[in-house]
Image (cartoon, helix red, strand yellow):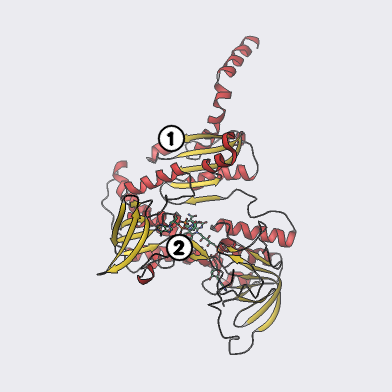
Amino acid sequence: MKEDIAGIPAVPGSAGQPPEKRKADLVVIGAGSGGLSAAAGAAMLGLDVVLFEKGEMGGDCLNSGCVPSKALLSAAKYAAAARESSAYGVMSGEPVTDWEAVKAHIRKTIDTIAPVDSRERFEGLGVTVIREHAHFTNPNTVASASVAVSAKRIVIATGSRAAIPPVPGLADVNYLTNETIFTVPSLPSHLIILGGGPIGMEMAQAFRRLGSEVTVIEMDRVLARADQAHAEIASEALRKEGVSILDRHRAVKVWKDAGKVSVDAEGEDGTKTISGTHLLVATGRKPVTDGLALEAGDVDFDQHGIRVSDKLRSISNKHVWAVGDVAGKGQFTHLAGWHASVLVRRAFFKQGSTSSSLPLPAVTYTAPEVAQVGLTEHEARERFGDKVQVTRFAFDENDRAIAEGKTEGECKLILKKGKLVGASIVGEGAGDIIQLVGYAMSNKMKLTSLTNFISPYPTRTEVVKRAASAHFSDAVFGKPARLLVSLLQRIL
Ligand SMILES: Cc1cc2nc3c(=O)[nH]c(=O)nc-3n(C[C@H](O)[C@H](O)[C@H](O)COP(=O)(O)OP(=O)(O)OC[C@H]3O[C@@H](n4cnc5c(N)ncnc54)[C@H](O)[C@@H]3O)c2cc1C
Ligand SMILES: NC(=O)c1ccc[n+]([C@@H]2O[C@H](COP(=O)([O-])OP(=O)(O)OC[C@H]3O[C@@H](n4cnc5c(N)ncnc54)[C@H](O)[C@@H]3O)[C@@H](O)[C@H]2O)c1
């Protein structure tokens, strides 16, 4: 693919001077989750690391992704708790949202975490941090306005940005993205959200709980990568809270009129026009490959990002690696962190992990949470056919869930001939609970490892042990077992 080199600063040096030339062991472009972890890992091994960042240290996750979204969701949780509290015998009224105070909570959360990602911390680790836009000048050199650094290893960790679909009229309205939604001047009165992926669904519930009217327009099904039944449980919960979800509706036209933004959404039953005060575009992400002069670096890329092998090394330039969203293998902070770990092990210890050598967890932080690790039941059946077994346990039989009145959900373990290949959990705390299964799978443990331990009572995580135990219940309590026990009773 040919590269769009727009965005490369025209000025060669800070005061019109040619950039200073230097060497380093490792150059990292991008100080987000992936780039920071790579830089820290290499610096802690005593290597000479140069890190370029053109924007805010911490990248998307800290500034316009995971952190602000989870801070917003936590504010929204209090609003929901106030509404629900009378069911628990505690009376409170309809909550009042102070949007400025919610934004202050978001800002405070970012500011509290920011020092971990800061220039000062990384300089303390020995990393040279250059707060400038960087681009390739040749296959082993990266330059910014002030410096050109040559290195044996260069890591591209430039992340992704919101992908804007080619919907007629969209470019002419002031739509919001993840970069602007957390600082919008007033609480949207009616927020229309294009896209029912993790961003769309998390934001839909957060704003609805804080008092906005919310409409989600999704051209396929919501949370399409999650277990379908679990995604439906989550969308039903959002609907009950008043979120209007138009799934299988494609946005085909957008326009602004008399201070309102309107969207035509086309479904099987015709076209509906939705009018609101704000429009959030959450229709997926686009890797940031522009402005890097990748052709000068002999770095191949396509619409998914830098073309790398599962070892995260560029297929066209052996000096170059890619980590995080720009590597085109998934868009999660924990995946970016894992990529950095793969890079450090491979590049400096010659160890053999790859991007896909551990099962990847994914959690959407709606209430209920929707969590996945490894394969969904659907993916497993497509791959392994009738060798697949499913064992499950419902939250409404879990005493902690009953005590807390959060009984919607289930834990589903997916097995291939008795071996764990995935798990899907929907319910309160699913993202925490699923770690137990991820741990067992990553360490290639047997299903019995999920039954052979004492789980504290009453905890929601007991659902994992109960789902695993259900798989063995026939063997343990079935007719053959009963016969054996009665025989042994007579002998012993
Ligand atoms: C709203 C939202 C919520 C999310 N929630 C979660 C969540 O709950 N859990 C989760 O795991 N993931 C979540 N994600 C995804 C997560 O934020 C990303 O997967 C993660 O930030 C990717 O990290 P990265 O290092 O690849 O890229 P980024 O964090 O995007 O960092 C890339 C950095 O590179 C810099 N850069 C780009 N080009 C250049 C250049 N030429 N020169 C110098 N610097 C450059 C950018 O300025 C940026 O700082 C969320 C994302 C969004 C948008
Ligand atoms: N909790 C988390 O871990 C978390 C939270 C947010 C984001 N993320 C990461 O960020 C990524 C991006 O999230 P996202 O929600 O933007 O993307 P996504 O790709 O997951 O979902 C986008 C949705 O928009 C729909 N869409 C596209 N064009 C449309 C149109 N014209 N009309 C209607 N619908 C349309 C798609 O069908 C899709 O379902 C996620 O895949 C995830 O990896 C993670």
Q: How many discs mark residues in the rendered view?
A: 2
Q: Position of residue 425 (x, y in %)?
A: 49, 42
Establish if 482 lies above or below 273: above
- Disc 1 + disc 2, Cβ < 8 Å: no
| Residue 49 visible from this viewpoint | yes
Mark 2 is on which residue type? Thr
- Nearer-the-camera pick, 2 or 467: 2
SS type, badge 1: helix
Q: Residue at x 50, y 40 (%)?
A: 461
- Nearer-the-camera pick, 47 or 288: 288
- Neighbor class of circle 1 (other Cα within 10 Å; few <14, some 14-19, many 20+) is some
Mark 1 is on which residue type? Asp
Q: Position of residue 144 (x, y in %)?
A: 60, 79
Quarter of the figure with residue 208: bottom left
Q: CA distance from mark 1 to mark 2?
A: 33 Å
Q: Position of residue 39 (x, y in %)?
A: 64, 67
Quarter of the figure with residue 255: bottom left
Give the residue number, with chain letter if any, for mark 1.
399
Position of 51 compared to 180: left or right?
Answer: right
